Image (cartoon, rainbow, N blue to C red):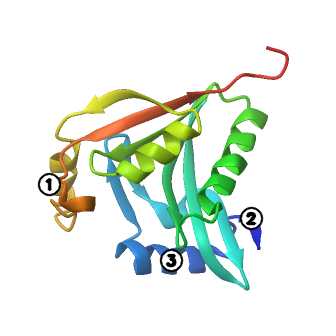
């Protein structure tokens, strides 16, 4: 198993991954509209099969994680991908990493908080606004929780020597 950057050589497989697991490559969140198969990121693969995928964008001194997927939960795939992107952010001199998740995503909230991310903002009705652009977004999420809001999580990075 290995972690590799998304490149021109594996981008077609990244596209197929998003289509298979999300039905679309487009992600609409309050920070923007993204074609995830065109973003920078990392894949976690075994035998040329993508088992995990993370995409990100840079905003000045902030790295924003746009998507994180793991086909097999509880195996450390998401943790390894997050470690890789945190190393990149520190190497690039970023001050923090941000990400958004929805109010229903209890597992993600638990995962990120254990990794030092803090909830800093609730964006009310963000999902309803995204649905106006992309009607295929479901209204009911995990555990039959109605989808309404996004939560922004942040991890502050300490630069070397601080």
Seen at 57% across and 58% down, the residue is: 54
Name which quarter of the figure residue 76 lies in: bottom right
The answer to which of marks 1 and 3 sits earlier in the sequence is: 3
Seen at 50% across and 37% down, the residue is: 113
Name which quarter of the figure residue 135 lies in: bottom left
Q: Give coordinates of residue 91: x percent, y percent.
A: 78, 36
Residue tagged by mark 2? 3
Q: Give coordinates of residue 115: x percent, y percent.
A: 59, 39
Point out the residue furthest to the right here.
161
The answer to which of marks 1 and 2 sits earlier in the sequence is: 2
Question: Tag 3, which secondary structure?
Answer: helix
Question: Tag 1, which secondary structure?
Answer: helix
Q: CA distance from mark 1 to mark 2?
A: 36 Å
Which sits in the foreground, 70 or 62? 70
Q: Is residue 124 visible?
A: yes
> Badge 1, how many Cα within 10 Å: few under 14, some, many 20+?
few
The answer to which of marks 3 and 2 sits earlier in the sequence is: 2
Classify the position of the C terminus by image quarter. Answer: top right
Q: CA distance from mark 1 to mark 3?
A: 25 Å
Residue tagged by mark 1? 132
160 in relation to 85, above or below: above
Point out the residue furthest to the bottom here.
47
User: Label 3 near label 1: C-beta < 8 Å?
Assistant: no
Which label number is shown at residue 17? Answer: 3
Which sits in the foreground, 148 or 128? 148
User: Label 2 near label 3: C-beta < 8 Å?
Assistant: no
User: Label 2 near label 1: C-beta < 8 Å?
Assistant: no
Question: Tag 2, which secondary structure?
Answer: strand
């Amino acid at each position: 198993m290995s972690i590799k950057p998304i490149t021109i050589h594996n981008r077609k497989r990244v596209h197929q991954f998003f289509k298979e697991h999300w039905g679309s490559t487009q992600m609409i969140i309050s920070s923007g509209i993204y074609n995830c198969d065109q973003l920078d990121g990392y894949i976690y693969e075994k035998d040329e099969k993508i088992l995990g995928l993370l995409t990100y964008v840079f905003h000045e001194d902030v790295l924003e994680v746009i998507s994180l997927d793991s086909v097999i939960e509880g195996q450390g795939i998401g943790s390894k991908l997050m470690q890789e992107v945190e190393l990149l952010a520190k190497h690039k001199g970023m001050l923090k990493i941000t990400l958004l998740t929805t109010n229903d995503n209890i597992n993600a909230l638990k995962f990120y908080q254990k990794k030092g991310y803090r909830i800093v903002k609730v964006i009310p009705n963000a999902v309803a606004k995204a649905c106006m652009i992309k009607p295929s977004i479901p209204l009911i999420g995990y555990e039959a929780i109605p989808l309404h809001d996004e939560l922004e999580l942040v991890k502050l990075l300490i630069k070397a020597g601080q």
